[in-house]
Amino acid sequence: MNSGDPAIPTPAMPKPAMQDQATAQTFAIPDNVYAETVTFVRHYTDHLFRFRITRPASLRFRSGEFVMIGLPNAVRPVFRAYSIASPAWDDELEFFSIKVPGGPLTEHLQRIKVGDTILMKKKPTGTLVLDALVPGERVYMLSTGTGVAPFASLVRDPETYDKFEQVILTHTCRQAAELAYGQEIVEAAAQDPLVSDFTAGRLKSWTSVTREPWPRTKRVTRAIEDGTLFAELGLPPFDPATDRVMICGSKDMIADCKALCLAAGLTEGSNARPAEFVVERAFVD
Ligand code: A2P
């Protein structure tokens, strides 16, 4: 998810102290928060960018999980949920973010530069994890917009391929330019020798664009309903015996994809009770 839980103000704690990048105030970093350094920023469109930060040596996470991210620009920083887009083996952490004009976090986050400090709460969590799915033959990862972020992690994780023979990533955006990050990840998965050994012939990508002309202009939900998703991939329709589904997008997208999974006879899973599909909401402000 790239998402917005309600703002969680963090109480100031005694130490260590740090300078507010925007206002030069000095305040304390709470014990449950890491202060990490930005190592890379790339802007894709007026609305989307990705960034990488140093990874704390003590951080352990499962691919697909999210963390709470904030900036040291207030005594009580605003934190928002961000899926970790890098795989668990990467020595840095990557995030993919929307830019919301006037958004409490992204208005400031979109201006970060290499060397700036990012705050990150120490506990990763989430349901878009392999542990929440029972084994199967293939896993579909259905995403819209920045909902592709957790799957950017999962498609580069060897464990995904240990568990599933085939991995299908779908990404739908309003404009074609918004597909770029997901396409980069899929291309990297095909070319990077670290990853291509297990993705070769097993990772398939399906993309669509809904608000400008493009070779495929259909919501994924419509493509599931009318069968074109399966026809284009050369696969049979969802089957609870073989297929698992992970869903990440807007509230409405999740509700509609979930209804299609339920209609196909799939059961929703969780960390406590793994089953055949899992969902997580992606939005941030
Ligand atoms: P559309 O352009 O037809 O609304 P958003 O930025 O609103 O989250 O949309 C991102 C992408 O997700 C768009 O391509 C949008 O299509 C699509 N989308 C929005 N709502 C749904 C839904 N309920 N089911 C499937 N796709 C959706």
Image: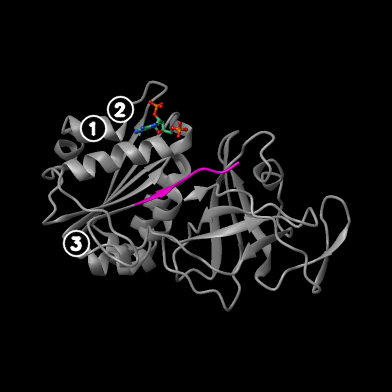
Q: Amino acid at mark 1?
A: Ala
Q: Look at the picture and state if 29 lies above or below 184.
A: below
Mark 2 secondary-structure assignment: loop
Label 3 CA crowd tier, 10 Å (few <14, some 14–19, many 20+): some
* Amino acid, disc 2: Lys
Q: Position of residue 285 (x, y in %)?
A: 60, 41
Badge 1 density bin: few <14, some 14–19, many ≥20, Cα 10 Å: some
* Mark positioned earlier in the residue sequence (1 or 3): 3
> Which residue position is annotated with label 1?
223
Number of the front mark, 1 or 3: 1
Q: Quadrant of residue 150?
A: bottom left
The residue where tag 2 is placed is: 218
Residue 165 shows which numbered tag?
3
Q: Residues within 10 Å of mark 2 (few under 14, many from 20)?
A: some
Residue 225 image offset from top left, x and y in percent:
19, 32
Which residue appears at 21% of the width and 44% of the height? 262
Residue 114, quarter of the rendered image: bottom right
Whether ligand 1 has any atom under 8 Å from the Cβ at mark 1 is answered as no
- Give, as a single range, the part of the protein colored magenta: 279-285
